[in-house]
Image (cartoon, rainbow, N blue to C red):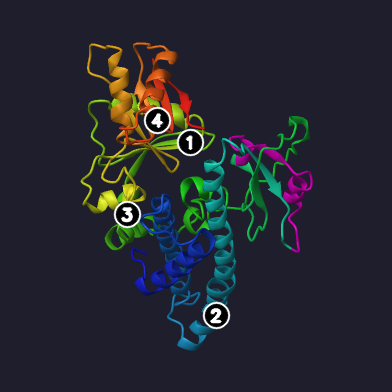
Amino acid sequence: MTEIDRGLFDETWKVFNQATDEGYGVRTMYDPDYDFYQQLKYNNAVFSAFRTHRLQNDIAAQLVDENGKLKSFDRFAEDVAPITDHNVKHWLRTEYDTAVLRAHQAADWEQFRRVKDILPNLRWMPTTSITPDLVHKQYWSIGLTLPQRHPFWSNHRPGDRWNCKCSLEATDDPATGKELIPHEEDRPDPGLDNNPGIDGKVFSDTHPYIKDAGKGAKKAVENFISENIEKPLSLQYVSYKKYKNGGEVLIHELVEKKDDYKSLLTVANQLAKEGNIVKLTPSVHFKSEAYKEIYGSLTGTIYERKCPDLKVGDLFYEFESFVPPFKKRKISNMISHGAKQSSRIIINNNKGASDRYIRRNIYERLADKNFKYDIEEVWVYEKGKVRQLFKKQ
């Protein structure tokens, strides 16, 4: 009850990591989504530990007969055969196949976020299964098309049934009218009610291995994971706020809560309300392992060695403020300094410089041949709100 069998765990974890590599694709620390890849594998470890605990205890329960006496080995082997046959063969096969599909859907979801400005809607595509799910059929048969942030996707999506082979496609086609959206009350299968592209979990915590875990399972898993599985530095984030549309604010444990922290938190919340996953990132030494894991995607770019303040999805943003008193020239300083940290900047404009004045400063920087940095986006933070002022076309 209090331990996890290491050998069985290792083999189980390897299976789900293979499924992740097949569905999501192998990532290196220099890929922008490496930290999410690590998150998927870490969560695979947690799931594998719960699965192992369940299997080892189901087997151990067969050691004694109905009178509490130790069974002979032959009877024990006969009684556990159905458990091992279903758990290690049939169930694991189904779980593996579903894990591949859901890991692939997680990769798709990241791509959807990247192109949402030009392809804002998602269309439910027909299944490739020879036995279509009737609930899902009503969605793809009408080409159901809805915005990425529509609440429908929080309750229904491809992959919320075992071995579901439906998929989504990003599109700029018009959304399906409200009156045509099927009102289906059927819920996802247990363990498949999450979006792996958002929380990095191939299987959710409602899976029976976790939700219906036996006595001592949760503590055994916590102890085993903390003692045997190193949590990637890039995943040491604490959830600060979650929103129903999937948006979330996470704060890295190494973030120092001083200077512009309160303003950063307000900005992060505003962006998360729009359905974004927003991370407050720490300032760490560029030679550290933490830097490689958190900022590895900046390696080889002009921003290598920099530590931007925020990560929204897979893009870094730098927040720039000013030391009072405010003067207009400080707008120029904030834009210049911010562009040296990231091509995406959020500036403190609480004193209300005009949009025209800010844009003029942006264009001056872009026209300056001696200014070697790029400016792709500029957002302004004003009185607790944040809005996009400039985006390079």
Q: Amino acid at mark 3?
A: Pro
State the residue position of label 3: 232
Q: For mark 4, what is the residue?
A: 268
**Distance (Cα) linking label 1 and label 4:** 9 Å
As rendered, which of 84 and 115 lies closer to the eye? 115
C-alpha span from label 1 to label 2:
47 Å
Residue 212 drawn above or below residue 76: above
Q: How many other residues sit within 10 Å of disc 2, few (<14), some (14-19) or many (≥20)?
A: few
Per the image, label 4 sits on a secondary structure element best described as helix
Q: Which residue is label 1 attached to?
A: 276
Determine which quarter of the picture holds residue 240: top left
The Cα atoms of the two marked residues, 3 and 2, are separated by 38 Å
* Residue contact at pointers 1 and 4, CB within 8 angstroms: no
Quadrant holding the N terminus = bottom left
Q: Is residue 86 above or below residue 131?
A: below
- Whether residue 30 is situated above or below residue 11 in the rendered picture: above
